[in-house]
Image: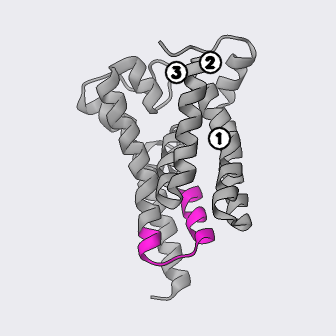
């Protein structure tokens, strides 16, 4: 198969993998309320934690992370360059946020992005995690931890990989994460965002 055609097939596969909503599946497995209509109405690990507890949330987090990692690992196996892999990450992320299987209404994409980062540049992924944990311990607000980690991720990525073209794609994803967190940002500005218990 021609490399260009193979890349298009991989992008399509990545979008479909991203479109598998771990939160919705986990909620059905555990007979929990639909995460799209309960809590924050977001099919993500944080909302599953609210409505279903730590076990269900952990499975959701791992599942969403694997969704991000698997397409990257496939791209590595097929020997695509880093720029192509970052486009794979973007498409996988878009699958999570706009899943074709669930009326294009998905999660906010942080866990899927993190899983992809760990598979692409584990040092960048670890830097994201360390930042998130530090901010969460100090400020005790999950969304703010995610947003601060997201802001710093392109800096970490460029310093670690020295790949400017790929960094631009990472910046695009990070901007999109801010877009998916609009409601959180409004609550943060109004001092109404929930804190981590």
Packing grade of label 2 (10 A; few <14, some 14-19, many >=20) is few
Out of 46 and 122, give the one closest to the viewer: 122
Question: Which residue is drawn at the image coordinates 65% and 24% (left, top)?
Answer: 184
* Gap between marks 3 and 2 measured at Cα: 20 Å
Name the one closer to the observer, 31 or 188.
188
First in sequence: mark 1 or mark 2?
Answer: 2
For label 3, the SS is: loop
- The residue carrying mark 3 is 40
**Distance between mark 1 and mark 2 Cα atoms:** 16 Å
How far across and how far down the image is residue 27, in percent? 32, 29
Chain-order first, disc 1 or disc 3:
3
> Tag 2 or tag 3, which sits nearer the N-term?
3
Tag 2 residue: 139
Mark 1–mark 3 distance (CA, rounded to whole Å): 20 Å
Quadrant assignment for the N terminus? bottom left
Label 1: how many Cα within 10 Å (few below 14, some 14–19, many 20+): many
Q: Position of residue 167 (x, y in %)?
A: 70, 59
Quadrant in which residue 64 is drawn: top left
Instruction: Confirm or deny contact between disc 1 and disc 3 (CB under 8 A).
Output: no
| Residue ID at (69%, 66%) | 163
Q: Residue furthest bottom?
A: 2
Tell me which secondary structure the magenta stretch mostly adopts. helix
Q: Which mark is residue 150?
A: 1
Q: Is 119 included in the stretch rendered in magenta?
A: no
Q: Residue 92 got which mark?
A: none
Where's residue 113, x and y in %?
54, 48
Magenta residue span: 74-91
Q: Is residue 85 magenta?
A: yes
Q: Is residue 118 visible?
A: yes
Colour scheme in use: one colour
């Amino acid at each position: 198969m021609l490399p260009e055609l193979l890349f298009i097939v991989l992008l399509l596969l990545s979008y479909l993998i991203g479109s598998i909503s771990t939160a919705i599946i986990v909620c059905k497995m555990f007979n929990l309320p639909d995460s799209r209509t309960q809590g924050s109405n977001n099919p993500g690990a944080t909302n599953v934690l609210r409505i279903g507890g730590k076990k269900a949330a952990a499975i959701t987090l791992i599942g969403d992370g694997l969704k991000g990692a698997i397409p990257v690992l496939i791209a590595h196996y097929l020997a695509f360059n880093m720029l192509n892999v970052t486009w794979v990450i973007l498409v996988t992320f878009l699958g999570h946020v706009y899943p074709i299987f669930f009326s294009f209404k998905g999660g906010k994409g942080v866990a899927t992005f993190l899983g992809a980062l760990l598979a692409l540049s584990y040092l960048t992924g670890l830097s994201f995690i360390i930042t998130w944990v530090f901010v969460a311990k100090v400020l005790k607000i999950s969304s703010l931890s995610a947003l601060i980690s997201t802001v710093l991720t392109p800096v970490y990525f460029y310093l670690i990989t020295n790949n400017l073209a790929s960094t631009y794609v990472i910046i695009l994803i990070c901007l999109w994460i801010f877009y998916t967190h609009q409601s959180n940002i409004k609550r943060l500005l109004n001092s109404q965002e929930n804190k981590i218990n």
